[in-house]
């Protein structure tokens, strides 16, 4: 059986890899015109991870659920503030932001610290902790992507008028 420490360390390694991948994808996306599909699809793909809650061991308590959603929504504000679009050559582009990388690293660091603190002090089961942090991440990504889509549609309407 995998130890609690191993699972925490593995989740930290995966989080670091995700930061690298997200940043590389983001940099690539600033060079191409934005399209609605690429804004909408990530939360839809991520939503499939919700199937983990079929198994009781992943389900958080009501307080953990509410806390995760609230924290995720608060963290989403940082992502929303660092994600802006601009119109160039009659196309919509995602603006490159150095603050986005700093924000992303900070958010992942906060999540890692949270996992370590929860694992050491509250002794939450690793499976349940996975559920909690999935909810936190989804609650962060969904409002961020909705905000991006709204901004994209606003600029698209502006372009269509021209």
Image (cartoon, rainbow, N blue to C red):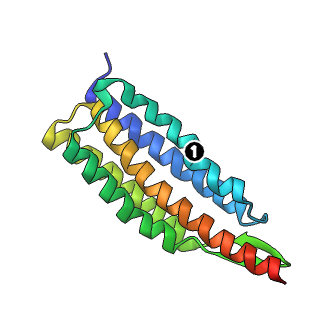
Q: Which residue is labeled 1 in the image? A: 44
Vertical comparison of 150 with 65: above or below = below
* Residue 130 relative to residue 121: left or right: right
Q: Quadrant of the C terminus?
A: bottom right
Q: Position of residue 125 (x, y in %)?
A: 23, 31
Q: Position of residue 56 (x, y in %)?
A: 29, 25
Vertical comparison of 33 with 40: above or below = below
Give me the residue at 71% from left, 61% from top.
29
The single residue placed furthest to the top in the displayed view is: 1
Vertical comparison of 97 with 2: above or below = below
Vertical comparison of 162 with 114: above or below = below
Q: Position of residue 35 (x, y in %)?
A: 74, 60
- Bin the neighbour count of mark 1 within 10 Å (Cα to Cα): few under 14, some 14-19, many 20 and up: few
Give me the residue at 27% from left, 46% from top.
65
* Residue 46 relative to residue 120: left or right: right
* Residue 84 relative to residue 62: left or right: right
Disc tally is 1
User: Which of the two residues, 136 or 115, is positioned nearer the viewer here?
Assistant: 136
* Residue 145 relative to residue 12: left or right: right
User: Which of the two residues, 155 or 109, is positioned nearer the viewer here?
Assistant: 155
Q: Quadrant of the N terminus?
A: top left
Q: Secondary structure under badge 1?
A: helix
Q: Position of residue 109 (x, y in %)?
A: 37, 56
Residue 24 visible (yes or no) = no
The single residue placed furthest to the left in the displayed view is: 121
């Amino acid at each position: 059986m995998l130890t609690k420490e191993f699972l925490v360390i593995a989740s930290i390694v995966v989080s670091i890899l995700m930061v690298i991948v997200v940043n590389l994808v983001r940099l690539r996306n600033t060079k191409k015109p934005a399209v609605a599909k690429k804004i909408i699809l990530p939360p839809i793909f991520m939503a499939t991870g919700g199937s983990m809650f079929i198994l009781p061991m992943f389900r958080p308590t009501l307080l953990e659920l509410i806390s995760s959603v609230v924290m995720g929504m608060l963290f989403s504000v940082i992502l929303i503030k660092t994600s802006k679009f601009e119109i160039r050559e009659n196309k919509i582009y995602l603006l490159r932001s150095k603050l986005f990388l700093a924000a992303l690293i900070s958010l992942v660091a906060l999540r890692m610290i949270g996992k370590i603190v929860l694992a050491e002090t509250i002794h939450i089961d690793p499976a349940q902790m996975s559920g909690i942090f999935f909810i936190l991440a989804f609650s962060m990504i969904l409002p961020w992507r909705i905000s991006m889509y709204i901004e994209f549609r606003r600029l698209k309407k502006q372009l269509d008028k021209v």
